[in-house]
Image (cartoon, rainbow, N blue to C red):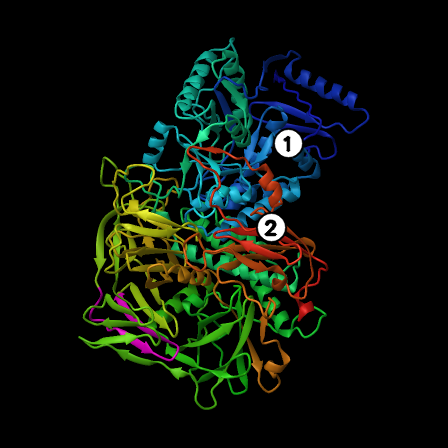
């Protein structure tokens, strides 16, 4: 209990929270609109005189007389009563209507009056006023900005608030990441970044997951970013309205969530969905301008309402208790960007706690999700089980939040590219040795972390905010690019153990290669000059792939790392690529390309694990690269492509149809690839005027797009790859590509600008159809990790009432989607997060692009109408991308999905330099091939390194992931071993510590603290497989299916890889 003085308010804590506005004194004064609260720090020996002076000034200012009301806020949990846990919180979007920095400093308030600085300043002041008050904070991207602005005195105060439990960090990632369109590696990375900050500054590990605003919730979030991080519980706000209604009736809003069938109960977590949302009950909002009734408890004034407000409180509490198990309920007292003046909340919460507890019917207390979780656990209740996920999410009959699975597809691709690049850059940073002063990967890490926010990569932000995310990624990439180039140069030049400081070679990279722009490769190779290409492989197994680069001259030859000429192919550059290149180079760089390449140069590369190979391109002295044969199909003509086991046959009569034949496994299928668009709903239904928009997919008709038969089909043949080019219509172009010795099909698409001259927004999809009988069933990945079974027009947890047969069957896809029948399985993999489904048996549908003209009334207040401008010429965004498909005998498709899916995420990294053949015998003077592993070692094909990162003092963070689920593959869904010694040749491992997933605590300590919940009908941990402890002598690590293990590795010396070269 604390005494609160009404006039004046003098609270003299031991320490203070804010820099003095009197810079040369120890007196600190806050001015608020409702309280005048001097806060004083006494460091002077004459502090008694100072107390007297401050007190005297106060009494002179206020006239000498003081009255006060004393509120008892000290109540804790009371057994036998209904306990209402009041959780004071703010939800601070790391960008949405304003950019992250605008939200932090409080600028651009014409859009939204929000300032996170005010929230955090005000929160500290309010907590100091009463030791019983509590507050939780989530978004470390904001808190870190604020922390960097504070003095040491303020930091010490905040540390005391954290230590006392008044301020608790929940979730603890840099942002509250999305759960639909983020990759699991990005989820881990951004969470690790925030947890590292909290560990370094406060020596704490967050206990609770708090995903209150993402638009649906994934299985990976529950078991991986929940249980495997060490969280005791996970709370969230958005589940389907039909599901919520059923769970209220059954008192099953709170469950034990087993998100992984492979890890089962060993990775389960207590999870709770809020009864409505993450806001307070109706009538209990207390921000300055909110219209809820305050508790007016001064009997000398009009509108005294204490009993009315207590009755309202009790009624709301009992109502929630009727849908909740145990005698504990949580009220989330806050919402978006609240507590900008925290006293307006805490004054009312103090009064409510005081008067509700005097009333005695229920017990109210200041609480946190940790306290609430402990109370639920202590109740010793058995909880219902939940498996799979909470997708798709709908908040009403025609309000399916499935459009954002595809919204802003170019930004989604950029995020995914930067994610794979960041993984590779950290490896190269480790090889060279981390430099805190730069260049390093820190800027890219921050930009990527923020981009995982649930209004960032989702595409649900305003356009200027999307631009800000892209700008941050570009800045981060620029510094990481410098690091990558210099690290590769060091590795190429290294011939001694002296390390690498200032390499001579200057490598260039090509981030705009997707639009056929690569100045480094578009050079005139005059006689005596060669182009050097270093190809880096960030995966732990050897890769044999085809790379393609634009070149000016087709008369070239390619040599490998040993100087041996290898086969290569020249393909003419299609006009569509030239147009794309010219427009977007001007749009992005503000200048026209100086040259226009005429060809693509394609050749096969072989790259060792965690290493590179070198290739040189030179002017041909005799016979150069093989030029592709180009053939235009005539009417009624057929043509086949494919040089190995896989053959595809096309016909001009049936341009959508392809005959797919794999001679190795005897699979044959008719494949039809078509395009369609859904017209976006325009709100004309007066009963439910729900528009389609950035969040909402609500189609108003399906329109098949017919192929333009007057445009010929062009077929290219060559020794490396074959292509079929098809102009589908004026704004859709498709290339079907098949590589030598590969058994999958690559489809490249260019979609846009989507026409809107008819006043109709459009959502463009491709549909790949087969003759397979798939019984309404298909499978989609969860954040690139586990695959989850989906059944059309069906939900596992409730009887679905179908209102939207298309939108209601769309699911997020990060890795891929597949269908199967009793003989075969048909898999499609993607290069970015998109939405997809199987709306008919044997079909797979992918939404590629969206352009809409109306807002969908979910807060962003802006149509999803992306444009790019060159000078005053603005037109709709064009999107270029790829997807890949393959048909396998039943039970044999997982290996391709897992292996090739990882190669899509981690593409080969290309670095270019020129050399003079006369002065430089590159093969003899440089390292032309390299592997970071022991020369005899490669990772098992079911294991991938998802993190290799140097930390402080030469320690290394290593994460190993098993790629397969239980029973997914007859050979690879098994416990597998990795030899750590062979991952670090030339180094002596001193110590290996296994950590939690976010590396903020040792795994053994995490397991000791784990709460073991009772589950209805549970029989324990039977059948769950986990890898054993690390052999201290052999340094061997075991991984079971779907297991990810995180280690901090200490070496005997801090020297880097160059010592072993």
User: Which quadrant holds residue 551?
Assistant: bottom left
* Quadrant assignment for the N terminus: top right
Q: Nearer the viewer, residue 54 or 264?
A: 264
Residue 918 drawn in magenta: no
Tag nearer the camera, 2 or 1: 2
Few, some or many residues within 10 Å of mark 1 (<14, 14–19, 20+): many
* Quadrant assignment for the C terminus: bottom right
User: Which quadrant holds residue 248?
Assistant: top left
Residue at numbered disc 2? 1029
Position in image of residue 318 (x %, y %): 42, 19
Q: Is residue 233 above or below residue 843?
A: above
Per the image, label 1 sits on a secondary structure element best described as helix
Q: Nearer the viewer, residue 777 or 291?
A: 777
Residue shown at the point (42%, 70%) measured from the top left: 516
The stretch of residues the image draws in magenta is 707-728
Q: Can residue 501 be spotted in the picture?
A: no
Position in image of residue 66 (x %, y %): 63, 12
Q: Is residue 487 above or below residue 187?
A: below
Position in image of residue 882 (x %, y %): 37, 63
Residue at numbered disc 1? 161
Residue shown at the point (45%, 75%) measured from the top left: 604
């Amino acid at each position: 209990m604390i005494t609160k003085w009404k006039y004046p308010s003098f609270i003299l804590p031991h320490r203070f929270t804010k820099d003095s506005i009197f810079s040369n004194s120890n007196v600190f004064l806050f001015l608020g609109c409702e309280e005048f609260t001097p806060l004083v720090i006494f460091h002077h020996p004459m502090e008694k005189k100072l107390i007297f002076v401050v007190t005297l000034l106060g009494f002179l200012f206020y006239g000498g007389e003081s009255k006060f009301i004393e509120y008892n806020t000290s109540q804790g949990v009371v057994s036998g009563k209904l306990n209402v846990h009041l959780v004071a919180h703010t939800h601070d979007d790391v960008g949405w209507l304003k950019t992250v920095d605008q939200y932090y400093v409080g600028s651009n308030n014409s859009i939204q009056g929000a300032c996170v600085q005010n929230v955090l300043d005000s929160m500290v002041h309010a907590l100091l006023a009463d030791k019983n008050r509590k507050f939780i904070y989530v978004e470390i991207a904001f808190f870190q900005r604020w922390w960097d602005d504070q003095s040491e005195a303020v930091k010490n105060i905040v540390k005391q608030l954290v230590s006392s439990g008044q301020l608790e960090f929940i979730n603890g990632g840099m942002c509250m990441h999305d759960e639909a369109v983020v990759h699991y590696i990005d989820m881990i990375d951004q969470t690790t970044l925030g947890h590292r900050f909290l560990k370094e500054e406060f020596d704490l590990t967050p206990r609770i997951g708090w995903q209150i605003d993402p638009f649906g919730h994934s299985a990976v979030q529950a078991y991986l970013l929940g249980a495997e991080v060490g969280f005791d519980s996970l709370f969230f706000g958005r589940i389907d309205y039909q599901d919520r209604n059923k769970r209220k009736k059954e008192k099953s809003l709170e469950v034990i969530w087993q998100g992984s069938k492979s890890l089962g109960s060993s990775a389960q977590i207590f999870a709770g969905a809020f009864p409505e949302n993450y806001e307070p009950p109706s009538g209990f909002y207390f921000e300055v301008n909110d219209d809820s009734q305050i508790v007016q408890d001064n009997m000398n004034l009009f509108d005294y309402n204490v009993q009315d407000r207590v009755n309202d409180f009790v009624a709301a509490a009992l109502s929630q208790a009727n849908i909740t198990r145990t005698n504990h309920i949580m009220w989330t007292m806050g919402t978006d960007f609240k507590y900008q003046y925290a006293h307006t909340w805490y004054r009312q919460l103090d009064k409510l706690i005081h008067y509700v507890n005097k009333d005695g019917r229920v017990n109210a207390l200041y609480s946190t999700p940790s306290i609430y979780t402990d109370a639920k656990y202590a109740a010793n209740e058995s909880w219902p089980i939940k498996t799979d996920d909470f997708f798709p999410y709908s908040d009403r009959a025609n309000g399916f939040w499935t459009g954002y699975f595809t919204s802003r597809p170019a930004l989604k691709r950029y995020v995914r590219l930067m994610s794979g690049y960041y993984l590779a850059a950290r490896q190269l940073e480790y090889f060279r040795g981390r430099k805190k002063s730069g260049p390093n990967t820190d800027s890219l890490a921050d930009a990527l972390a923020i981009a995982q926010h649930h209004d960032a990569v989702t595409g649900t932000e305003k356009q200027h905010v999307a631009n800000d995310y892209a700008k941050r990624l570009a800045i981060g990439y620029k510094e990481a690019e410098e690091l990558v180039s210099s690290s590769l140069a060091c590795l190429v030049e290294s011939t001694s153990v002296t390390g690498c400081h200032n390499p001579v070679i200057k490598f260039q990279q090509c981030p705009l290669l997707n639009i056929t722009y690569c100045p480094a490769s578009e050079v005139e190779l005059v006689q005596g000059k060669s182009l050097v290409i270093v190809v880096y492989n960030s995966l732990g197994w050897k890769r044999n792939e085809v790379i393609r680069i634009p070149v000016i001259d087709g008369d070239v030859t390619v040599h490998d790392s040993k100087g041996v000429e290898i086969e290569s192919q020249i393909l003419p550059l299609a006009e569509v690529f030239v147009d794309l290149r010219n427009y977007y180079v001007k749009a992005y760089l503000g200048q026209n390309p100086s040259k226009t390449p005429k060809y693509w140069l394609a050749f096969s590369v072989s790259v060792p694990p965690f290493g590179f190979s070198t290739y040189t391109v030179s002017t041909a002295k005799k016979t150069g690269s093989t030029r592709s044969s180009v053939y235009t199909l005539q009417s009624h003509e057929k043509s086949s492509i494919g040089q190995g086991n896989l053959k595809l046959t096309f016909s001009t009569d049936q341009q959508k149809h392809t005959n797919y034949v794999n001679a190795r496994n005897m699979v044959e299928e008719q494949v039809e690839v078509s395009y369609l668009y859904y017209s976006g709903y325009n709100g004309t239904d007066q009963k439910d005027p729900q528009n389609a928009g950035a969040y909402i997919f609500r189609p108003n008709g399906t329109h098949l797009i017919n192929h333009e038969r007057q445009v010929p089909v062009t077929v290219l043949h060559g020794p490396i790859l074959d292509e079929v080019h098809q102009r589908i219509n004026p704004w859709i172009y498709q290339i079907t590509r098949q590589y030598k010795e590969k058994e999958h099909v690559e489809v490249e698409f260019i979609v846009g600008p989507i026409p809107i001259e008819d006043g109709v927004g459009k959502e463009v999809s491709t549909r790949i159809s087969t003759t397979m009988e798939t019984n309404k069933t298909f499978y989609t990945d969860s954040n690139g990790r586990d695959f989850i079974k989906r059944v059309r027009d069906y939900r596992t947890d409730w009887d679905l009432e179908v209102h939207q047969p298309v939108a209601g069957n769309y699911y997020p896809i990060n890795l891929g989607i597949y269908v199967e029948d009793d003989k075969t399985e048909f898999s499609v993999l993607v290069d970015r997060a998109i939405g997809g489904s199987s709306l008919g048996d044997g079909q797979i549908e992918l939404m590629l692009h969206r352009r809409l003209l109306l807002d969908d009334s979910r807060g962003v207040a802006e149509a999803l109408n992306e444009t790019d401008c060159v000078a005053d010429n603005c037109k709709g965004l064009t999107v270029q991308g790829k997807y890949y498909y393959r048909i396998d005998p039943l039970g044999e498709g997982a290996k391709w999905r897992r292996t090739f899916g990882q190669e899509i995420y981690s593409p080969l990294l290309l670095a270019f330099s020129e050399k003079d053949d006369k002065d430089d015998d590159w093969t003899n003077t440089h390292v032309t091939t390299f592997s970071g592993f022991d020369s005899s070692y490669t990772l098992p094909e079911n294991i991938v390194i998802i993190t290799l990162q140097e930390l402080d003092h030469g320690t290394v963070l290593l994460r190993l992931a098993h790629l397969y689920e239980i029973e997914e593959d007859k050979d690879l869904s098994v416990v597998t071993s990795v030899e750590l010694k062979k991952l670090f040749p030339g180094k002596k491992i001193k110590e290996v510590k296994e950590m939690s997933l976010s590396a903020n605590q040792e795994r053994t300590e995490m397991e000791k603290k784990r709460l073991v919940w009772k589950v209805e009908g549970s029989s324990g941990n039977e059948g769950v497989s986990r890898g054993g402890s690390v052999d201290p002598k052999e340094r061997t690590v075991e991984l079971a299916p779907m297991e990810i293990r995180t280690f901090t590795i200490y070496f005997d010396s801090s020297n880097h890889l160059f010592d072993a070269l």
